[in-house]
Image: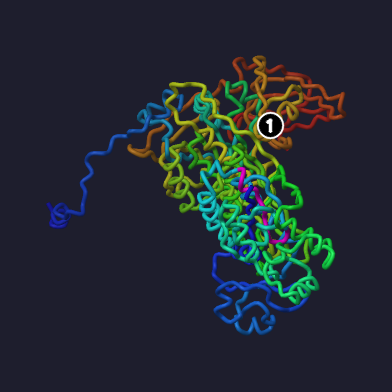
Amino acid sequence: MSDLLNTLLHDTRLWRGHRQMAVTQTPEPTGFASLDRELGGAGWPRGALSECLLDRPGIGELQLVLPLLQRLTARQKYVFWVSLPFIPYAPALARADIDLSQLVQIDTESRSDLLWTLENCLRSPATGLVLAWPEKLAARDIRRLQLAAEAGQSICILFRDRQQASQSSPAALRLELTPDSQLGLQVNVLKRRGGWPGQSCRLDLAARAGQDTTVIQGPWSRPSGN
Amino acid sequence: MPWLYLHFRHLLLDHIARAHTTTAPLAVLCQGSRQVLQACSRARQLGVGPGTAFKTALNLAPDLVVMQADDDLQSRILEQQAHWLYHCLDRITLYPPDGLLADAGSVRRLYGGLQPLRKRLQKTLDERRLTATLATGPTPLAARLLARAGTDCFTENPDEMTTRLGALPLSATELEEPVLRRLNRLGLSTLAEVQQLPAAELARRLAPETLSHIQRIYGQRPDPQTCWQPPSDFRQRADFGLPVEKAEGLLFALQRNLTELENELRWRQQDTDSLLLILHHYRKQPSRLQIRTTGPEHRADAFLDLLRIRLEQHPLEAPVEALELRVTRFLDRHTTITTDLLNDQPDTGEAWHTLISRLQARLGEQALKHLAPAADHRPEHAWQSHRLTSRRQAEPSDQLPLRPLWLLPHPAPLTVAPEEWLKGPERISGGWWDGQRVLRDYYIARLPGDQLAWVYRDTHQGWFIHGWFG
């Protein structure tokens, strides 16, 4: 053994972490068996931030959180949608058995308003889940949100651009979402607390386009890409 | 029988001092003339006293906070005092600008004597940092004269009260100046001496009005009092003397006013959900801030928290000379109904109300919305958003068609050819009844980049994206 290692091992300030603290939190399963397996049964972390990194909308990113939404709203927990890119379509949410009276949509005008809103929502014990689409966040801001989520023991999922994947983030769970041509969603675990990252799985989300796929061809013109 | 009179020797001074945290010297100027009328103890130490010219006073104490004496204002402040006095005493009459009369006899048994009542009143006065002379008298006018003369008379013994009253010098009896001079020339100096004179002689030699005044003091002539009725709304005012430029400067005075409100609400056993804060500026329209809480509230801390957020968001338009707090809406208190007795989940209703109140105070009421489906075939009209305050229960509908989770606020032109057509067409036609006609064929299609989109073709052969299957 090298001298350096020896001195290090005899240093009382060094802690040899061969046993990790068991996760005492009750897990919040994602609702997808294959993803839950990859996440080691931990699901969405409670009292911490999760990040979903994606390129474009419409790849099934909301399908990923639908089971969680259904469960939390059924438990009469409030779900906040903050700073949305589009309108969450109420008929579709109602069709997915989500209690709409438990959803609150919040529009914010500035970045400081957004952070303040997120922090307040996360700290409140009334909150079950916060979904947010922030434009740009500094690592310092994410750290603050992380602390707020810890204080309130609520779940927060941030939807961010996939370009942020290369940057480090204090979030407890980071998922990279990429679609495939069979309407599936490839989920890569970039980081997870209490385990090794690197797992990936494919979720089949073809059902969101309806059960039977029938297209009636008409004599009308088709868009051909101009 | 005994009447109680509270004489506020320097009400304006106390009123301004209440709105300040610092111990700057304070003074009240005479209306019209530039002379000091009243000065606080700190100002008196610096040599500023009643009668000092304003300029001299400013030289002696450069940081002197001055206020013009204003009888209207003082009457309003006096009424403010009647509010809390009403919690302790009955049958209050206002004697503007500086006195309050109340019937001490009717509450004597409630307090177990007059001395406990005095203790209670003195404590309340100290809490509000007010100085007042308290005196009891056999008649309303007698109580007033004794209090104004500063006599230490707080008893229910009629003989003692009469003795004290008789010892009053004539100058303290509020008789007119020529009458006083004539009585003086007659060699009379105290009230008792005048009272002993035969009534008929007194009326003949002086004036019938003088006799009736003396008789009213001694209760030989009726002196009816009109009782003050507390208004149904709550109003509190704080004056600063020196204009306040920063919002933080308002918070101290606000806290005092909100504590008053909390006491008032506790006494009424009611709650409120809206406050109106009016900020008075110098030669400018006052600004009005309406604060709403989502649920019934009575705690001063909760109100202060909301007001602080509101003031952070909206900087002051101009320096503030005075602030006024108004509450007109009162709600009865109810116990919270817990649906499940054995529910071990902590009750989050209050946390919810606090959170929503905070968010609305900063972002505005319209920023928070609930969503609900609406009965319409046109996709852009098939949903609605409503405010959180209106709790509407959406009727469950089981026959909902397949729709995307994201709807674009405005349909975007489809610029690329879809890679795969999955479903369609679904023809949606409607709106002929309100002029917003829609005739479209909707398809579900996979675009390059593997996005699943809800696209439509309109009557002009244009293709648009209307939603994403997120």
Q: Position of residue A53 (x, y in %)?
A: 50, 40
Q: Is residue A182 magenta?
A: no
Q: Nearer the viewer, residue A61 or B90?
A: B90
Q: How many marks?
A: 1
Q: In this view of the protein, which residue sits in the foreground, A66 or A180? A: A66
Amino acid type, residue under disc 1 in the picture: Ser
* A97 to B222, vertically: above or below: above
Q: For label 1, count other residues whose C-alpha is less than 10 Å away and answer few (under 14), some (14-19) or many (20+).
A: few
In the displayed structure image, the side of residue B281 where residue A73 appears, left or right: left
Q: Residue A113: percent from the left, percent from the top?
A: 59, 50
User: Does residue A171 lie above or below B217 as drawn?
Assistant: above
Compared to B8, does A86 lie above or below? above
Region rendered in magenta? B96-106
Tell me where residue B20 appears, x and y as whole percent: 58, 65
Q: Secondary structure at mark 1?
A: loop
Residue at 54% in and 70% down: B23
Q: Residue A81, how many percent across, how many down? A: 58, 37
Q: Residue at x 69, y 82 (%)?
A: B53
Residue B105 in magenta? yes
Q: Is residue B245 visible?
A: no
Corner quadrant of residue B408: top right
- The residue marked by circle 1 belongs to what chain? B
- Which residue: 60% across, 83% down? B60
> Which residue has dot 1 on it?
B390
Quadrant of residue B54 in the image?
Answer: bottom right
Classify residue B440 as left or right of residue A65.
right
* Rendered view: A67 above or below A11: above
* Left or right position of B1 against A167: right
Give the side of residue B297 with respect to residue A170, left or right. right
Q: Nearer the viewer, residue B59 or B214?
A: B214
Viewport quadrant of the C terminus of chain B: top right
Report which quarter residue A193 is drawn in. Answer: top left
